[in-house]
Amino acid sequence: MRFFLKRALISVFTLFCVITIVFFIIHLIPGDPVQLMLGEGAQQADILKLRKELGLDKPVGVQYKNFLKDIFSGNLGNSLIKRESVKSIIMERVPSTVYLAIGGMIVAILIAFPLGIFSSKKSNSPLEKLTTGLSVLGIAIPNFVLGPILIILFSIYLGIFPVSGDSSLMHFILPSFTLGTGLAAILIRIIKASLEEEKRKSYVENFKLIGLPDEKLWKFHIIKNAMVPIITVLALQFGALLTGTIITETVFSIQGMGTLLIESIKARDYPVVQGLIIFISSVYIIANFLADIVYLILDPRIRKGVIG
């Protein structure tokens, strides 16, 4: 219980720091959103009136206090451009980004786990060398290069998948592969390194001496114990995928949080930018907290250390 409470407090404090940093950084960005909303020919009286309505005429400290009060009451404010609730604007875009992130994660897991495990089992084999080469290639090719290549090959040339959009499952296949390839390349290296480290531990040799079959040794001991650092990476990378969708969504014209963030930055729509960053950060922090819980389930040694 003490472990969960400690982690929960750390998570809340981290989120508070993120909220504070985001607020002050956003307010340091040059440009006047009110002037942008009303246009260059706006009258000074209209500018002052709108500034007062939006609360931008108050000192930064007062704005920060009101901002915190609104955030912890679940109010992310209203868009300066659309004049709609930031929460509703973000919620409209969340499904597309979540579908893309989950698709990317599924692609990464389906590629990385078999290749990572088999390459560790078959050390110094042609399969291991091929896997190493593929992982290096996956890391080296960025999304904004891989995406257009896949569009040209599978959409324009072969006509199998749609070029862009997010209205059906078929629209998410190429973007998910684009997003998941880079993560798969990272996961392959981490899975292999974790398994190699686990293979060298003394208990593995002891189980071999008593005649435990390799299949059971790998399935119930080596792979299971090696999962703890891998789960860490998966939790961290899921949050990273939400931010990594920005480029992929732009390439494939998916109307998700990534494209919304780009649009809001260009329009200097501060409340929407703040809301998006806070939302994504919250998901990232929650994913890490859930990863800590999974640690206790997967590895009894951690559980014993916490209880003791």
Image (spheres, grey):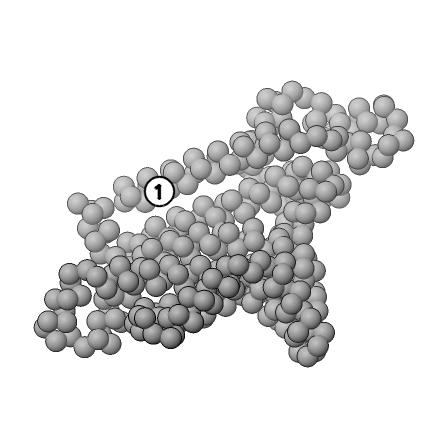
Instruction: Tell me residue 66's x, y (percent).
Output: 60, 28
Q: Amino acid at mark 1?
A: Arg
Name the image quarter holding residue 165.
bottom right
Tell me if 190 is positioned left or right of 25 in this view: left
Q: Which residue is under mark 1? A: 7
Instruction: Tell me residue 254's x, y (percent).
Output: 67, 60
Instruction: Tell me residue 214's x, y (percent).
Output: 21, 75
Asked whether residue 93 appears in the rendered view, the answer is no
Decide which of 134, 37 is in the foreground and name it: 134
Tell me if 248 is positioned left or right of 117 in this view: right
Above or below, comparing residue 191 to residue 289 in the picture: below
Asked whether residue 49 appears in the rendered view, the answer is yes
Q: Quadrant of the C terminus?
A: top left
Tell me if 230 is positioned left or right of 39 in this view: left
Element carrying mark 1 = helix
Counting every numbered tag in the picture gives 1
Q: Quadrant of the N terminus?
A: top left
Question: Mark 1: few, some, or many residues within 10 Å (few <14, many ≥20)?
Answer: some
Decide which of 173, 188 is in the foreground and name it: 188
Above or below, comparing residue 51 to residue 221 in the picture: above
Decide which of 182, 256 is in the foreground and name it: 182
Above or below, comparing residue 287 to residue 111 in the picture: above
Residue at 39% over, 70% down: 129
Q: Residue furthest top?
A: 59
Decide which of 174, 141 is in the foreground and name it: 141
Instruction: Tell me residue 37's x, y (percent).
Output: 80, 36
Name the image quarter holding residue 41.
top right
Residue at 20% over, 47% down: 305
Residue at 61% over, 69% down: 174
Above or below, comparing residue 222 to residue 60 in the picture: below
Residue at 34% over, 63% down: 192
